[in-house]
């Protein structure tokens, strides 16, 4: 028994499978797959990398059982194509070789499937099938499924499950949440049928039960089926947690586990609950599983929802809130999460910051991606680890922010001797400011994780309060140089900008007492908007002034959705506005209509962006024959840009 986490590492029998611990991975879609929509080698490696990390199971997500009618996105797996069997077998074998249970999510999009849309432009259907007749907001006509169609779809689930089982998969998750087909039948908002498949809870469960029974008939007795559901739909007309409990009570007689999530990801405002953002507490959806567990007595209950801390995971199981915790994005950020917990190396876990960069890349590039872990998307290389250098070099890294620290780590892991110089007395760079924004403390924790990893390297020397100049470069005479000296805050040419009430984000470390009740933020980019949310949560009266026509234009799409919802809770804003002066009366601006407005302010926070230290960085790299510039000194951007640039520079040496 594990002494520190006895509940987390207790085995659990589910059906005829024994999970070696209580840490599962929820379904995650394979990205960047081949044009045949099978599971390509890179995707197999994505799953295997995390199987090596000590998780009880690894789940291949978004396997569509009926691609004619049930496919909603162009990156979903064609589970009904017999040609996919070899890639199923390869993936199952890769997972099983690490004492990990290969699991597959079976899914169907229902009314969102089979018709042309932005995410599935090649679909040819003229209408879609769902529980009830309707016309969706985008004009797509939905036809109610008849019983013949329902039996056909149930058989599709069974056929895909059978093929996957024969290829080596040992466990299945039935996607009954988040707005997909099965959830559409469970939801009174979508299911308006008056026959035996609509109305009461039992009737709305009838089609899901038909699917489960069809799968059961196709598989050997005891093969575990996990039912993934939204504990509550969280929108008007959808079911609440009380109805979620009733649904779970009905379904527990037919499945081997109930897996509780939340919301509907077809309702854009729910992105922050189905994939919890950092605005919400860790484990935000666990209460739904805890309530359902009170009503489900025959099978285990699994929970999910931004869980990245092992102590929280242990408490969830020890207190009886759930029997299993599902670690999703945290397993991408650190595929060795479970192993590190078991080995007592919690401080070595690279914790997910819940930025949704991974989900954003699904829309942008269809690639596996993580803002902090550059192994994701390159798992085939990561499985074998970094290639040791045959010719160790003396490497100088200028700048101790995320770009510089990642460069130093990558170079050191390959065997080079590294000197890391930071001009200030503390490593961390721009993300040190996140320490003072309550909901972004995970970003600050990431900076401290980098520091801990560097201090464990015998071949890394850290020099604080050391500014790298061309003269210092020539004195050290490195074989290679990485310049990551960052950027400086932009000071707009505004009369009154030097007044005592004017501060910058880096000044927040001086304490909350320096921020008055009435705050005006000049600059409505990501940094200004995040700070505005934090100030508003602390009871401040906050107004943002932004020259562009929209707030947070530099934020990634899904993060911006959650950010705008937070701003709408009480932060005022003027977009398309120009600040004219800061005076005793406050911040004087011209709004988008040309009107003069004066905003009284006790504190003015300037978040007008960053200017790269281009001239300084070019002079530094010119002093070394082999050099790289990375991060904000090239172009100010998101943390992931610095992480990526630094990592690859270090790997290139």
Image (cartoon, helix red, strand yellow):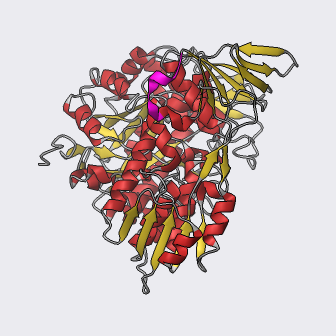
The spot of residue 224 in percent (x, y) is 32, 45
Residue 295 quadrant: top left
Residue at left offset 54%, top offset 42%: 356
| Left or right: residue 651 compared with residue 611 | left
Which is more toward the observer, 32 or 381?
381
Q: Residue at x 26, y 43 (%)?
A: 22
| Res 595 quadrant in image | top right
Question: Could you tell me if residue 526 is visible in this image?
Answer: yes
What range of the chain is rendered magenta?
509-516
- Depicted 489 relative to depicted 281: above or below: below
**Per the image, is 228 magenta?**
no
Q: Is residue 512 magenta?
A: yes
Q: Can you say whether 604 is above or below 427 in the image?
A: above
Image location (x, y in percent) of residue 418? 42, 71
Q: Give the prevailing secondary structure in the magenta stretch.
A: helix
- The front one of 405 and 414 is 405
Q: Please name the residue shown 47% across and 43% down the image.
A: 432
């Amino acid at each position: 028994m594990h002494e520190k986490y006895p509940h987390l590492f207790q085995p659990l029998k589910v059906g005829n499978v024994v999970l070696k611990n209580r840490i599962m991975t929820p379904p995650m879609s394979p990205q960047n797959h081949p044009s045949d929509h099978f599971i390509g080698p890179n995707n197999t490696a994505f799953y295997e990398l995390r199987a090596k990390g000590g998780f009880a199971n690894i789940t291949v997500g978004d396997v569509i059982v009926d691609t004619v009618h049930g496919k909603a996105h162009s990156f979903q797996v064609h589970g009904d194509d017999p040609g996919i069997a070899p890639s199923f077998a390869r993936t199952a074998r890769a997972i099983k070789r690490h004492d990990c249970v290969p699991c597959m999510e079976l899914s169907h999009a229902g009314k969102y499937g089979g018709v042309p849309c932005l995410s599935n432009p090649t679909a040819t259907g003229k209408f879609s099938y769902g529980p009830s007749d309707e016309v969706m907001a985008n004009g797509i006509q939905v036809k109610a499924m008849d019983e013949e169609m329902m039996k056909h779809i149930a058989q599709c689930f069974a056929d895909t499950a059978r093929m996957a089982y024969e290829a080596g998969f040992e466990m299945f998750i039935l996607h009954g949440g988040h707005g997909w087909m099965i959830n559409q039948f469970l939801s009174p908002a979508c299911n308006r049928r008056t026959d035996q498949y609509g109305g009461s809870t039992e009737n709305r469960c009838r089609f899901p039960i038909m699917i489960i029974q069809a799968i059961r008939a196709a598989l050997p007795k005891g093969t575990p089926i996990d039912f993934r559901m939204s504990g509550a739909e969280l929108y008007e007309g959808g079911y609440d947690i009380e109805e979620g409990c009733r649904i779970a009570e009905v379904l527990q007689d037919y499945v081997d586990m109930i897996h509780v999530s939340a919301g509907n990801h077809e309702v854009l405002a729910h992105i922050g609950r189905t994939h919890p953002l950092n605005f919400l507490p860790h484990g935000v959806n666990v209460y739904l599983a805890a309530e359902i567990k009170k009503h489900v007595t025959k099978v285990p209950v699994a929970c999910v929802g931004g869980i990245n801390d092992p102590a929280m995971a242990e408490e969830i199981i020890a207190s009886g809130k759930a029997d299993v915790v599902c670690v999703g994005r945290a397993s991408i950020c650190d595929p060795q999460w479970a192993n590190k917990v078991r080995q007592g190396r919690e401080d070595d876990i690279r914790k997910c910051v819940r930025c949704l960069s991974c989900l954003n890349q699904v829309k942008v590039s269809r690639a596996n991606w993580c803002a902090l872990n550059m192994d994701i998307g390159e798992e085939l290389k990561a499985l074998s680890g970094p290639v040791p250098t045959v010719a160790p070099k003396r490497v100088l890294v200028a700048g101790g922010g995320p770009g510089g620290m990642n460069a130093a780590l990558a170079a050191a892991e390959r065997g080079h001797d590294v000197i890391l110089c930071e001009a200030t007395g503390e490593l961390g760079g721009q993300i040190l400011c996140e320490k003072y924004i309550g909901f972004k403390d995970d970003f600050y924790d990431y900076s401290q994780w980098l520091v801990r990893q560097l201090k464990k390297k015998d071949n890394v020397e850290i020099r604080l309060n050391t500014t790298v100049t061309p003269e210092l470069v020539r004195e050290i005479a490195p074989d290679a140089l990485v310049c990551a000296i960052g950027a400086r805050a932009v000071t707009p040419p505004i009369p009154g900008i030097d007044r005592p009430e004017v501060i910058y984000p880096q000044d927040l470390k001086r304490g909350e007492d320096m921020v008055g009740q009435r705050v005006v933020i000049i600059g409505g980019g990501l940094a200004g908007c995040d700070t505005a949310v934090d100030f508003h949560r602390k009871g401040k009266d906050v107004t943002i002034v932004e020259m562009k026509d929209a707030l947070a234009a530099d934020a990634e799409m899904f993060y911006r959705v959650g950010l705008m919802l937070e701003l709408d809770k009480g932060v005022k804003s003027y977009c398309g506005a120009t600040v004219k002066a800061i005076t005793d009366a406050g911040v004087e601006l011209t709004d988008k209509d040309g009107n003069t407005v004066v905003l009284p302010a006790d504190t003015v926070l300037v978040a007008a962006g960053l200017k790269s230290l281009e001239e300084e960085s070019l002079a530094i790299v010119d002093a070394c024959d082999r050099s790289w510039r990375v991060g904000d000194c090239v172009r100010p951007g998101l943390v992931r840009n610095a992480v990526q640039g630094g990592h690859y520079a270090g790997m290139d040496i």
